[in-house]
Image (cartoon, rainbow, N blue to C red):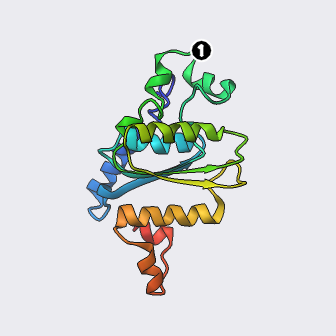
Amino acid sequence: MCWKNLKDAGFPDRILWHQAVAKKYPYYDISRLGVYGNSAGGQNAAGAVLFHPEFYKAAVASCGCHDNRMDKASWNEQWMGYPVGPQYSECSNIDNAHRLQGHLMLIVGEMDTNVPPESTMRFVDALIKADKDFELLVIPGAGHGSGGSYGRRRMHEFFLRHLQGVEPSSLQDQGSSISMANMIQ
């Protein structure tokens, strides 16, 4: 399904799965779903709020390859084919930045040697040109990853704000903490 169509990323099947679980378990709230990922998963996480915003409300994308024309050809060509054709633009987060709905946080390591940080910066530029709101976290000296413990904390706070409606500072003021598992319930 993803051949020349990386934006699919299994989302149609995942959406059906979530809907089936919600139908079986009424407490399973699919009105506040978020997604996160790193690298190709970062590309897909951002794609969730570009291509499926009616379902996914928030996404955190770290070190994503936001356009498969920019990364190492050996990886991209096995999924997107060669020569480069219109499918590359159709699946590009950069070319589709104008479609953003919901909440998006981008994390990028300044020294990423796997996916060029330029990919995230071009996506940022396209989002700005499309007048879209988003959050950007650049981790100085970091490589290909989600920003370590600082990035994880910021991701958790992002999801608390945008999926739970809770300001993390109010939790700290109360002297309480919340884990990702508690947030999901």
Which of the 4 quarters of the picture holds residue 139? bottom right
* Residue hosting label 1: 82
Per the image, label 1 sits on a secondary structure element best described as loop
Residue 51 visible? The answer is: no
- Classify 147 as above or below 19: below
Q: In x, y percent, where is residue 33?
A: 37, 55
Determine the residue positioned at 73% across, 54% down. 141
**49 or 128: which is nearer to us?**
128
**140 or 87: which is nearer to us?**
140
Which of the 4 quarters of the picture holds residue 21? bottom left
- Lateral position of residue 67 relative to residue 17, left or right: right
- Classify 176 as above or below 43: below
**61 or 2: which is nearer to us?**
61
The crowd level at tag 1 (other Cα within 10 Å; few <14, some 14-19, many 20+) is: few
- Lateral position of residue 31 relative to residue 182, left or right: left
Q: In x, y percent, where is residue 34?
A: 41, 54
**50 or 135: which is nearer to us?**
135
Residue 83 visible? The answer is: yes
- Classify 94 as above or below 21: above
- Lateral position of residue 127 relative to residue 99, left or right: right
Q: Quadrant of the C terminus?
A: bottom left
Determine the residue positioned at 46% across, 28% down. 91
Residue at the outermost top position = 83
Determine the residue positioned at 48% across, 30% down. 92
Q: In x, y percent, where is residue 64?
A: 57, 42
Disc 1 marks a residue whose amino acid type is Tyr
Q: In x, y percent, where is residue 68?
A: 57, 28
